[in-house]
Image: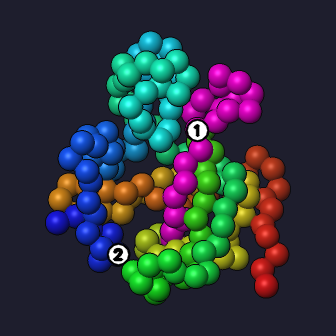
Amino acid sequence: MAEYLGVEVRIAPNDPISREFLEHAGAHRFVTQRCRDCELLQYPPGTACEHCTSSNFEWTELSGRGTIYSYQLVEHPIHPAYRERVPYPVVLVELDEQRGLPVPEYALRVMATLVDTEGKPERAAAVAIGKRVIVDFTDLGDGLGLPVFRLSDEPPEFEPWSFPLA
Ligand SMILES: [Zn+2]
């Protein structure tokens, strides 16, 4: 049985796209869909291309490198499984691939948790907009995995900024 924080991971039988995505992550490959018709990437994976509505996709592996575009510190667990994890950061990562395409404002942005090298939630004081991150994986069992991010050693493109901590 696949599980996350002790909770069973259920994938609907009519959702093969999510299953394939999590299977790639289980093999430690961070992938998304490339449209064979317009050649653009989209994330999250879905049934139709958000750029041209085609459903003609192939999986493509991503570098897993990006920048924290925004983040939130979750203080209140919305599920008992998260009780021991709070406070934990959820980050919106802007991936390096396809930044500014097809329009300057567009980018592939991924919501994920930010963890340290042991897989525990990263310290709140270490999280900041602009910091560079790299993908990592949490194994869920049953061949499935979940992409997460951790801080990388790469220098930021601009001076990182964080919300003042209370
Ligand atoms: Zn397309």
Secondary structure under tag 2 reads: loop
Q: Residue at left 62%, top 54%?
A: 92
- Pointer 2: residues within 10 angstroms few (<14), some, or many (20+)? few
Q: Tell me where residue 129 appears, x and y as whole percent.
A: 73, 58
- Residue nearer the viewer, 107 or 125: 107
| Residue 112 visible within the image | yes
Kind of residue indicated by mark 1: Leu
53, above or below 155, in the image = above
Residue at x-position 59% and y-position 44%: 109
Neighbourhood count class around disc 1 (C-alpha, 10 Å): few under 14, some 14–19, many 20 upward: many
Vertical comparison of 55 with 129: above or below: above
- Magenta segment includes 65: no
Name the residue rendered at 46%, 87% in the picture: 84
Asked whether the residues under the numbered discs 1 and 2 touch, taking CB atoms below 8 Å apart as contact, a structural biologist would say no
Between residue 92 and residue 64, name the one nearer to us. Answer: 92
Amino acid type at mark 2:
Leu
Residue that numbered label 1 is attached to: 108
Judging by the rendered image, the residue that carries numbered circle 2 is 5
Would residue 140 be found to the left or right of residue 113 on screen? Answer: left
Residue range (magenta)? 97-116
Does label 1 or label 2 sit earlier along the sequence? 2
Residue drawn at (47%, 69%) of the image: 117
Q: Is residue 160 left or right of residue 112?
A: right
Q: Position of residue 140 (x, y in %)?
A: 28, 63
Whether residue 66 is visible to the viewer of this picture, yes or no, is no
Secondary structure of residue under mark 1 = loop
- Is the residue 58 above or below the residue 80 in the image? above
Tell me if 133 is positioned left or right of 63 in this view: right
Q: Does the stretch in magenta take in 98?
A: yes
How far is disc 1 from disc 2 in space, using C-alphas? Answer: 27 Å
